[in-house]
Structures are given as structure tokens and as C-alpha cells.
Image: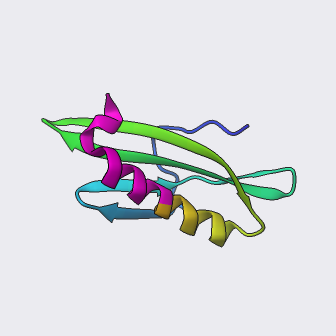
Amino acid sequence: MALITPKAAANEPTQEHDGYVIRATPFKEAGRFQLCGVITKEIDGVVQTHDFIRADTFMTMEDAVEMTFFKGRQLIDQQGDRIFG
């Protein structure tokens, strides 16, 4: 399994949502792409991060990225800043 690093690689797509940044970090596993991402937000001058991975896999990297953003937005909408606690 791939490790999620705190620094974004240049080729990792990002998307902003309600003041949060979602970074898509899918990785190839058994010929498919695993849904994986990082949510960050600066709170009181400190960057908070939440790594997430799901069992969902996709045939293409593009589909995995799209669903990573969807799941990230869903987590933010449901939990807000509690996601970091």
C-alpha cells in the first residue's frame, strides 16, 4: 500500500471546497486505482490534515481522482473541522 506524504507532489490534483483543500492521491493496486486522498485546512495558523482511503477501486486514474474529490467533499460536508479531531 502507498504511503500518503504530507507534501503534495506536483502531479497530485487538488480541489478547494469550503475553505478546505482536497488532494487526490490514488494509487495502483492489483491493476486498479484505489481511492485515496488528503484533506487539509489551516486553522489558527496550523495546517491540519486528514488522510483517507476507501475500499473503492476504479479502472482509470481519472475516475479514482473524481471519486476522491466526491468523497472528500462528502467528508467535509458531514464532519467539518471535526474531521481533524
Residue at 40 percent of width and 47 percent of height? 39
User: What's the residue at 42%, 38% (across, down)?
Assistant: 50
Where does the image place residue 81, in percent across and percent down from the top left?
25, 40
- Residue 3 place in picture, x, y as percent: 63, 36
Number of numbered discs: 0
Which residue is drawn at the image coordinates 33% and 33% (left, top)? 84
- Residue 25 versus residue 59: which sits nearer the camera? 59
Residue at 53% x, 38% y: name it: 5
Query: From the viewer's perspective, is 1 left or right of 42?
Result: right
The image quadrant where one finds the N terminus is top right
- Residue furthest to the front: 78
Say whether residue 79 is magenta.
Answer: yes
Tell me: 49 left or right of 51.
left
- Quarter residue 18 falls in: bottom left
Q: Is residue 85 above or below residue 71?
A: above
Q: Please tell me in which quadrant of the rendered image residue 82 appears.
A: top left
Question: Is the stretch drawn in magenta largely helix, strand or loop?
Answer: helix
The magenta segment is 71-85
State the residue lying farthest toward the right: 30
* Quarter where residue 77 is shown: bottom left
Q: Is residue 84 magenta?
A: yes
Q: Nearer the viewer, residue 33 or 5?
A: 33
Q: Position of residue 41 (x, y in %)?
A: 27, 45
Specify whether residue 47 is in view: yes
Q: Quadrant of the C terminus?
A: top left
Compared across the picture, whether 57 is left or right of 11 comes to right
